[in-house]
Image (cartoon, rainbow, N blue to C red):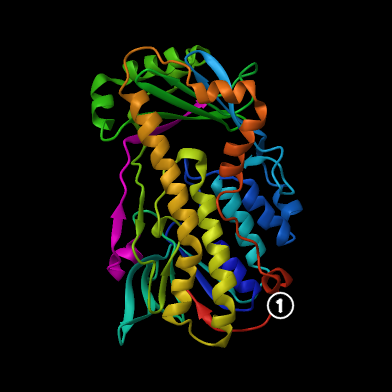
Amino acid sequence: MVLGFLLARAGIDVVVLEKHKDFLRDFRGDTIHPSTLELMYELGILHEFLQCPHEKLTTISAQVGGRTVVLGEFTHLPTHCKFLVLMPQWDFLNFLVEQARQYPTFHLIMQAEATGLIEENDAVVGLRAQTTEGEMEIRASLTVGADGRHSIIRQRAGLQVRDLGAPMDIVWMRLSRREGDPAQAFGHAEPGKMLVLINRNSYWQAAVVIPKGAAEEVKQRGLSSFQSEIAAMEPFLRGRVEELRDWSQVSLLTVKVDRLVQWSRPGLLCIGDAAHAMSPIGGVGINLAIQDAVAAANILSPRLRAGIPSPDDLRAVQKRRNFPTAATQWLQLTIQDRIIRRVLGRTAPLGFPWLLKLMQWFPYLRRFPGRLVGVGFRPEHVAESLAKSPRSEGRRAA
């Protein structure tokens, strides 16, 4: 959606396909980081964006072995917004659609699921999609796969995926919030258990971290056992876990960390989770995907206005985004293997890591994780030509 918006601002004819009838799906990436807010500022739409319902976080906290610690803070970042925004992804997407529809070259088709590629002379020249009115074909100068970690586009393109592994899965649910509850989102770690609570104003978005492939075992222990484990970690939830009446109220996220060896073929480019599935650690996936979109728009919009992007043009997007992707995944894998795997496999009481002690003794150190989460390894900036937003007709991208 971000790429479609940016290309439409550049006067390029764009079609965005969404397979559902709306964007209302729970437990998707809802953290809008300072780097993304900076892009909203550069596009001149930050004020309007912040009118949407949201929560602000200036710090990240966790409870470890009964102690509350600050893991990172955003107040010193070199951005206009020195906070992280929690906003339901459907509100974010609806906002982007509203902005994009101001440009006559932007077209959105709902309930249109991509099913295959159109190929001619070893190049992708469009795609096929199933809609409520039957199959349709869209021919395009460029086809972009941004359809997530289970991407149909990358499957149909035969692009090679490198699986980097993950030791855990996530179980999501809603629990009501009440007066007197903690105000901020936070995490909780105990031997063999991890819980994350995200403040959604009227409810908690709760995540229980479980060992990879253990979802069926959790179910076999029974719902009452699951409820008791949550209440044991956070006693203030004891009177609310009964709100989970059956397993249909619990969603499983199968965590994957992978990336494509090559993000493109002639006529085709993958970005976001379709190019590199991220761990939920730090909530960076949506923001890394948006950075991909900005880089792609900066590099490809002049080429699309002139004709069809060359394979070298498409490879330039991957070259630009390879380092931040690989560096972020390396950091996530390090946290997974050295912290999460050990916590989930531990039965003895947790000690208090020396690094966390240092961060409490020297608050300045909290700026470093805040920088990595809030800005990342290579933040993108909107090219001046896109920020100016000329409104002219051009080539088509799908």
The quarter of the picture where residue 293 lies is bottom right
Residue at (57% x, 62% y) in the render: 2
**Residue 373 is at least partly visible in this image:** yes
Q: Position of residue 358 (x, y in %)?
A: 58, 23
Q: How many marks?
A: 1
Q: In front: 343, or 224? A: 343
Magenta-colored span:
151-175
Residue 316 image offset from top left, x and y in percent: 48, 72
Residue at the disc numbered 1: 390
> Residue 332 appears in which quarter of the rendering?
top left
In the rendered image, the vertical position of residue 396 relative to residue 115, given as above or below: below
Confirm whether the magenta stretch covers residue 270: no
Residue 250 in view in this figure: no
Question: Relative to the observer, which residue lies in front, 153 or 73?
Answer: 73
**Amino acid under disc 1:** Pro
Residue under the point 71% across and 42% down: 82
Residue 139 position (above or below residue 81) = below
Bin the neighbour count of mark 1 within 10 Å (Cα to Cα): few under 14, some 14-19, many 20 and up. some
